[in-house]
Amino acid sequence: MKLVPTGVLGDSILGLNPAYFGMVMATGIVSIAASIEQWHELSVALLWVSIVSYAALVVLNLLRLIYFRENVARDLRVPNRTFGFFTIVAGTGVVGARLVMDGHVTVAMVLLGLNAALWLIFGYVLPPLAFTVRGGLPRLERADGTWFLWVVATQSVAVLSAAIQPHVTAGRTELALLAVFCWAVGVFLYMAVALFVAFRVFMYHPKPGQLSGAYWIAMGATAITVVAGANIATMVDVPILRITRETIEAVSLFFWAFGTWLIPPLVFAGYWRHGIHKVSLRYDISFWSIVFPLGMYGVGCHQLGMVNKMPILDAVGHVEIWVAVAAWALTFAGFLAKVFGWSRTAADGYRSRLG
C-alpha cells in the first residue's frame, strides 16, 4: 500500500504545475547574465539555486507521478499545462549552458543527451495531446503564451550543443548539425505558434485574468533564438556552418528586432491587467515567464552585439541584465514568501493536531 503524502506537502505535490521548471530556466539565464557582467559570486550563487531547484523539482515531479498519476495525466489534457512540460527540457539546456562556462563540459554533455532526448519525446507527444483533447474550449482558444515553450525547448538544444562544440575535439560536426537543425526547427515552430496565438488573441480577446506573464514567453522565444544563433556563429568552423552561418546571423537579427518590438505591447498588457482591471499583483508561477525573457534578451543583445561588432546592442544588453537581476530578486522574494506561508500553515496544522 502506498503511503500518500498528506498535508501541505501532499497538496503542494498534488497541485504542482509542470511549468515550475521555469524557475530553473529564469535562474540559470540570470546566472549566465551575471557571469557576463563578471559578478562571479552572484553568478555561482544563482547557479547553485538553479541546480538545487532542478533537483528538488525532479524529486517532487517523480513523487507526483508515483502518488498522483491521474493528476499528471490530467495535466497532459489541459493545453496551458501540457506545454509546461517543455520547461523541463529548457531548464536542462540552460543549466547545461551555464555549466559549460565553468568548464564542466562532461556534465554538460550528459545534460545535452537528456535535453535532446526529452525534446524529441515531448516534441512528438505533447503538441498532439494539446491539439486533439476533446471538450472544453475551441481548439484555437486554447492557444496561449505557454505554447511558445515548445520553441524555447527546441532552441535550448541548439544553445547547449553550440555552447559545447568549441570545447570538444570529437563530434564537432555532429554537434554543429544538431545546433543548426534545432535552431531551424525552432524558427519554423515560432512562426506556427505565433500564428495560432495571434488568432486566439484577436478572435477570442483574452480576459484580464487570462493575460498572464506567460505571454512574455513570446519574447523569450525570440531572445533564445538570438542566443542560439550567436552561439552557432562562434562555433569552430565545420562544413555545415559555411553554408548556414550568414543566414543564421541575419535571421537572428530579425528575431532580435521582433523581440524588441514585442516589449512595449507586453508591458502595456501588464498595465492593462493590473493597473486598469486591478488584477491582484501577487506572486504567481507565470512571473518566472517574465524573468526568463528579460535575462535571455540581455544575454542575446550582448552576444549579438559582440558577434556582429555592434556596441549599441552590447550596451543595451548590459542594461537589460540589470533589469533581469532586479526582476529575479523580486520574483524570488515572492517565491520565498509563498514557501514561508506554506511552512507556517504546516506548522499551525501540526500544533493544532498536538492539541
Image (spheres, rainbow, N blue to C red):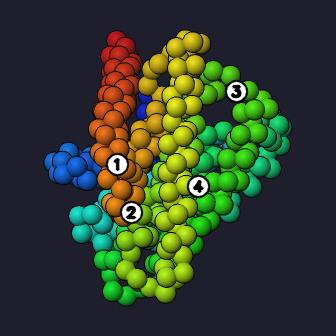
The residue singled out by tag 3 in the image is: 206
Q: Position of residue 333 (x, y in %)?
A: 32, 28
Element at label 3: loop
Q: Position of residue 264 (x, y in %)?
A: 52, 31
Q: Residues within 10 Å of mark 1 (few under 14, many from 20)?
A: few
Which residue is located at x 33 percent, y 77 percent? 166
Residue 331 appears in the picture as rendered: yes
Q: Which marked residue is nearer to the observer: mark 3 or mark 1?
A: 1
Which residue is located at x 65 percent, y 57 percent? 189
Q: Position of residue 44 (x, y in %)?
A: 21, 51
- Tell me which numbered mark, 4 or 1, is placed earlier along the sequence: 4
Measured in 3D between alpha carbons, the distance from the residue under mark 2 to the one under mark 4, in whole angstroms, is: 24 Å
Q: Position of residue 209 (x, y in %)?
A: 62, 22
Is 81 in front, or is 28?
28
Tell me the kind of residue under disc 4: Val
Task: Report the side of 210 relative to 173 (left or right).
Answer: right
Measured in 3D between alpha carbons, the distance from the residue under mark 4 to the one under mark 3, in whole angstroms, is: 22 Å
Cβ–Cβ below 8 Å for labels 4 and 1? no
Q: Which mark is residue 312?
A: 1
- Tell me which numbered mark, 3 or 2, is placed earlier along the sequence: 3
Measured in 3D between alpha carbons, the distance from the residue under mark 3 to the one under mark 2, in whole angstroms, is: 39 Å
Q: For the image shown, how many numbered marks are present on the structure?
A: 4
Element at label 4: helix
Q: Residues within 10 Å of mark 3 (few under 14, many from 20)?
A: some
Cβ–Cβ below 8 Å for labels 3 and 2? no
- For residue 161, above or below residue 36: below
Tell me the kind of residue under disc 2: Asn
The residue singled out by tag 2 in the image is: 308
Cβ–Cβ below 8 Å for labels 2 and 4? no
